[in-house]
Image: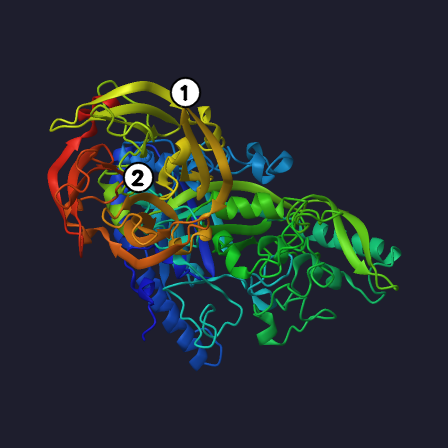
Amino acid sequence: MATDLRLRQSDEIQGDIVAGFKKDNVTLLFLKFEDAARARTWLRTLAPQIATTRQVADFNEAFSEARRSSGGDDPKTLKATWLGISFTYEGMRQLSTTDPFEKAPPTGSGLEAFKEGSAKRAGALGDTGDNSPENWLFGNGRSQPVHAVLTIASDTEADLAAAVTAQREAAAESKIVIIFQQNAKTLLGSRRGKEHFGFKDGISEPGIRFFDRPSAARPEEVDGHPGTRIIPAGEFVVGEEPAPGSFTDYPEWARNGSFQVVRRLSQDVPGWWSQISVKLKELKQAKAVPDTATAEWLAARLVGRWRSGAPVCKHQDRDVPFDPNASSDNDFDYRDDLEGLATPLFSHLRKTSPRAGLQAPNPSRPPFDAKELDGRRIMRRGAPYGHPFDPASEGPGGPDDPRGLLFVCYQADIARQFEFIQADWIDQPDFPPGRNPQPGKDPVITEADSVDFESRGPDGAIRHTPLSFQQFVQTQGSVYAFAPSLSTLKALAEGRLTGQSQGQQGGGQQQPQPGKAYPCDEFLAVPDQQRKGGQSQYWAFHSEQYRRISVADGAAHTDRAVEGDSRLTTWTCLQGVGRIDCVLPMPDLQNPGGKSWYWVFHSTGGRQQYRAVSITCGGGGYTSALERPDRDLTAWSSLGGVGQVNCFLPVPDQQRVGGKSWYWVFHSTGGRQVYRLISVADGAAHTDALERSDRELTQWGSLGGIARVDCFLAVPDQQRVGGKSEYWVFHGEDYRRISVSDGSGHPDRQVAGDRSCSGWGSLL
C-alpha cells in the first residue's frame, strides 16, 4: 500500500510551515499598514510570490539528494529565495474590513491568544521585568502596531539583499511602514547549525503525518530518523486531523494555515558561561559532581545535549563531536531516568519535550508515553542573529555586540502548544509535577531562582543540591501571527473574510439582536413534559445560557417561550461548564422513578470532555446532580480519533433493540464535520462500540449544502409515524426539516428547506 504523502504536493499551505525554508540567510520585516486599500493591492501582487509547500519540498529533496551525491557538500548550482507572509489579528481585520471573529473566540483557546496578541499575554509567559513588552523592539502593543510579518529566506547573502530591497520598495509604494527589520544567519564554520551558547540546534523537530515518510519497521517514526515521532498534521496545519483532544473548531479562513509565534531572544554568552563556572564550583564543594566534571559537563546537563548534539543520557562522560549519528540522535527517552540523575529534570531538553518517561503526579500511574504529548509539539523555524562571541574582538563579535536567537514556531493552537510549553513546562518550577524538592525552572532561558540538582551519594541514596541561576536570555520582541493558505491570501487581497466559524456559522456566542433568533447549541427534552396536553417542553441551550420552550403537536407546531434565559451555573450538575456542545440521554435510564440520566459533552479550554448527570422530576420542579465528573472522550471506544462531538441523532428504529441503542454521531475532524455510527448497550457499563466508521455529510441527501449540523430536534408528533421520523436540523442561523425512514439504509429526504431561526418565536 502506497504511503500517503499528500501534504508534500500542497499548493495551499505556505512552504515554511511543514517543509521549512531551511535557508542560511533570513530577514523578517515587521510591517504596519497605513492605507488598507493600498495594502490589499500590495498583497495581490505579493500572493503569487509566496512559496508553497510543493515548491519548497521539491527543492529541499533535490538539494538533499545533491548533497548526498557530492559527499556532503552544498550544491553550488541549487539555490532559491523564498517568501512567506503572516498577519496579526489587527492586520487581518484591516485587510478584510471586518472582524475575523464574528463571535468571541473560546476562552482559553489559541484563537483567543491570537486575538489578544503576545504583549497582552506576556506576564503569564514570564515576560516580566527586563523581558516585559515595554522594553521590546517590536510587538509591544504600545507604539507602532505590527500588522504583518514578511519572511524572506535565501541561500546566498546577495540574493537575500536583492529580495529585501525589492520588498522594501514594494512596501513603500503601498504606504506600508517597516517598523523593524530582523536579520538572521546560520553561523559559519565549526559553529554551523549551532546557537550562540555553542550547542547544536534544531535536532528534535517532529515529523509530520502525510508529509514525512514513515519507517517500515517503526511506522510511528520518520524513515531514516529513529526516535523522530510523526505527529498528526493537524497540530501544525489547521484543517488536518490533530492529536486526540486538540481544538478543532476553527474559522473557515484558517483552513490550511498555521499560527506563528515570532520572538527575538537576546543571549548574553559570556555571562551564561561565567555562571556555569561558578555553579560548577558550588557543586564540587557540595561533592554533588565528579571531581573531573568540567564546565562543558555541567552545561551539557543544563541543555540535555552536548555541544555536538549528542544526548547526555547516552553519552554521560564526554562529548562525541565527530560521531554524526550521535549528533543527530533522537532515539532515546527518559523511562530509565525518571529521577533525572543522567539528564536533570530541569534540563532544557526535558522541559521543552519530556518524551516518554514523564511521570504523572500520581505515582501509581505509569509514565506517559510519548504519543500522549503529541498535542504539545511545535514546529521551530528559528535562526541565530548577530556575530558569534569573540572575547578578543573590539568590533563585531565583542561581548556587548547584539546576538541571540530569532525564535519562530508554527502550530495550530498557540495556547495549547507554544504557551503551554512556555508557561506550564519551561517557566514552571513544579514540572515535572509532584516532586519534593521541585525540579525548578529551565535554567538555560529563564531566571531559575532554585533548581534541584540530583545526584547519587556514596551510600547510593539520592542527594539534592539547590542551585540558583540568573537569566541571560532576554525577550526583546514578540508577535503572534497567522500564516494563511494561498486561497485565504487571495481573499484578503480582495478584502473578503467572513469570520464565520468553520461549518458553524454563528452557533451560540454572539449577543442576541432584536428580532433575531439565537442559534441553539442543543435541545434537551424536559423528561416529564413530552406530549402532555398536546405540548412538549425542551430546554434550549445557547452559549452560557438556557431557556425553556414548548412545541405544540399539529401541522403548525406552534412554539413559545415558557421561561426566559438563565445561566448554566443555576444547574448544580453544570458547575464549571461554559457551554454545552451536546447531550446524550442514557437509553435505559430515562425517567425510571422520576429520575433521568444523561451524558453532557462540553468544551473547556479548547478540549471537549463529558460528564454524567441526572435530572429528577417531582413537586413541579427539577433538581440536577453531577453523577460522575468530567472525563476525556478517550473513555468511549466508539469515539476514537474524535476531537469534538457536535451532536447525536438516534437511529429511530434501533433504540433499545436487543439491549442496544444505535446513534449517528456528527463530529468535527480535520476541520470538517463527518459522521459515524455507534451503539450503546443497556446496563451499568453502557458498553459502546463503533459500528461504522466516518463518512462525509454528502451521504445524507437531506443535508445537502450544510457544512455543519449544530443540533437536531425531533418533531414531537412525527416519530415513527408510517415508518418515518421527522427532525428539525439546526445549522447556524437556519434550520430545515428532514425525515428518516426505518429499515435498511434508513433513507432520508428533505421535508422543508432552510428557513431563518427567527421563525421560532421561542428563540428570539
Q: Which amino acid does label 2 sit on?
A: Ser
Locate the C terminus and report the quarter of the image it occupies.
top left
User: Badge 2: few (under 14), some or many (20 or more) residues near its Cα, within 10 Å?
Assistant: many
Residue 620 sits in quarter: top left
**Residue 141 visible in rendering:** no
Could you tell whether 346 is left or right of 752 in the image? right
Q: What residue type is labelled 1?
A: Gly
**Residue 252 visible in rendering:** yes
**Which residue is tagged 2?**
501
Secondary element type, mark 1: loop
Query: In this rendering, is residue 509 above or below 645?
Result: above
At 65% from the left and 72% from the top, the residue drawn is 321
Marker disc for residue 368: none
At 44% from the left and 62% from the top, the residue drawn is 22
Towards the viewer: 758 or 725: 725
Residue 754, given in percent of the width and then of the height, sits at: 14, 36
Secondary element type, mark 2: loop
Could you tell whether 711 is left or right of 606 in the image? left
**Which residue is tagged 1?**
619
- Residues under numbered marks 1 and 2 in contact, where contact means CB atoms less than 8 Å apart: no
Towards the viewer: 1 or 306: 1
Q: Distance between the residues labelled 1 and 2?
A: 42 Å
Circle count = 2
Residue 564, given in percent of the width and then of the height, sits at: 33, 18
Locate the N terminus and report the quarter of the image it occupies.
bottom left
Scheme of colours in the image = rainbow
Query: In this rendering, is residue 40 above or below 678?
Result: above
Could you tell whether 316 is left or right of 82 in the image? right
Marks 1 and 2, the one that precedes in the sequence: 2
At 53% from the left and 41% from the top, the residue drawn is 477
- In the rendered image, the residue lying farthest to the front is 593
